[in-house]
Amino acid sequence: MIPEINPGTLINNRYLINRTLGQGGFGRTYLATDTQRFDEQCVLKEFLPATTNTELIRKSRELFEREAKVLYELDHPHIPKFLAWITNRERLFIVQEYINGKSYSQILQERLTQTRKPFSEVEVKTWLLKILPILNYLHDRSIIHRDISLDNIMLPQNQSQPVLIDFGVVKQKFTQLLSANAAHNNFSLSGSVVGKIGYSPPEQLRLGKCYPNSDIYALAVCAIVLLTGRMPNSLLDDSLNWQWRSYAKTSDSFANILNKMLAEVPTERYQSAQEVIFELNAIHSKVTTSKVTIGEPQPIELFEVQSENQAPTRLHPQAPISLSTEYLDYLQQELTSFIGPFASVLIKHNLAKSPQMTAEELLDAVSAKIPNRIRAHEFRSRVKLPEKTNIEKLQNLFDSQPTVDFPAISNPDFLNNCRRELTSFIGPIASVLLEKALAQSPHSSPNQLIENLVAEIPNQERAQQFKERIYKLKITD
């Protein structure tokens, strides 16, 4: 067995091990510091092949590298970013963004200790509508999480949106590789099943098969655990049928949705996360205005839908910078006339997938979801795009300035403006980021430099404010 890495060890001359976060059948997880990224905290997941077979270790490295690349290409605000794939001697690692917060398993236990009450139907319904778009994003890319449980759904500090962690993709491939070689090697696969007993569906635990609705099943188990305050094994009878209704106060409509998600046979479940989102919203004949947060006091924005005879309600009180709430309201109203109340879900889903999309990109995306091509074309032709925003007008005006074709480094006044304004947004680290951007792209134009600096500002709204401020300063110079 490969020994545990001691705190203070430097991996690949970059990642400084702080402590061990956990250990399972597939390896260990460490909290580390990235010494080449401003000492940012990250997670190192080490996968330990339970064999000394040289050929098997070589194959596992090749396999892990391919699978890690798939995960690395994921780009979703509520999925930890996969930062790197590394090897260190005989060790295999994936480097991942660190989520500083609590798992929903911890949040549930704290709530039961403090109040002795599990979560309500409204709370859990709202929570599901936060998780399901994440699953939809993954499933659209043919990725199945495989290991959903309350331990693998976290609430970051000072946030209201859950984050889905600890994918089972690499672990699943690892198991397949070991299984293929089990007859020729002296090691056991016991404990190597991907998924958690009680949470994972029968086809996954018994046959090792996974489908998108395998994740939906596991998410439903999470929901009934939150509703009842009981662990999964205490909600199953001797015949392994779910018996949870007597421990929770829920409406029949919500219970029916959960039971369909929990169907033993995969074909009897919902076939996509989007179907579940639609069903959850459909049980609201009126707009739900209450906003509830699980685990933290911040408000959670509900996925709202109206009956057909109601005026549309503003769907996005904090719309992306490039899209006004007025335009989103208008788009929702027009789309509702074509596909009904599902319009709000569809708009919300697309904005969650690509928060930075333009009005035209959003229009194209929702048009593509209208089944009837003639109706889709009619809708696309009917909707009028909004006028360009102030930032777009400023950017176009800035693009027309003669200095944009020259390297940014040739204009000291522009660089001083950038440094001063960036410092006002992110503090003293601004000088470091500016020097870094110039070192990486010494011949970049002012426009390119602005884009590079904007990408370094974590808060989207602040980033856009900085961008607009720089454009105004440059134009008035």
Image (cartoon, rainbow, N blue to C red):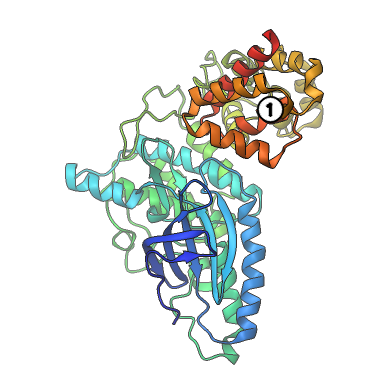
Q: Residue at x 33, y 62 (%)?
A: 236
- Numbered label tally: 1
Reply above or below: 385 against 415.
above
Label 1, residues with CA under 10 Å away: few <14, some 14-19, many ≥20: many
Query: In the visual, does 205 lie left or right of 67?
Result: left
Disc 1 element: helix
Reply above or below: 325 against 123.
above
Quadrant into which the C terminus falls: top right
Task: Work out whether residue 220 or residue 240 is closer to the camera in this orientation and state it.
Answer: 220
Indicate the quadrant where residue 177 lies.
Answer: bottom right
Indicate the quadrant where residue 319 lies.
Answer: top right
Residue 278 at what x, y percent from top left?
55, 36
Task: Work out whether residue 113 or residue 201 is closer to the camera in this orientation and state it.
Answer: 113
Quadrant into which the N terminus falls: bottom left
Q: Residue at x 51, y 30 (%)?
A: 459
Check disc 1 and report the residue beneath it: 362
Query: In the visual, does 192 lie left or right of 21?
Result: right
Indicate the quadrant where residue 122 lies.
Answer: top left
Q: Residue at x 55, y 54 (%)?
A: 213
Residue 474 at what x, y percent from top left?
68, 14
**Amino acid residing under circle 1:** Leu
Residue 447 can be seen in this image:
no
Residue 195 at what x, y percent from top left?
46, 65
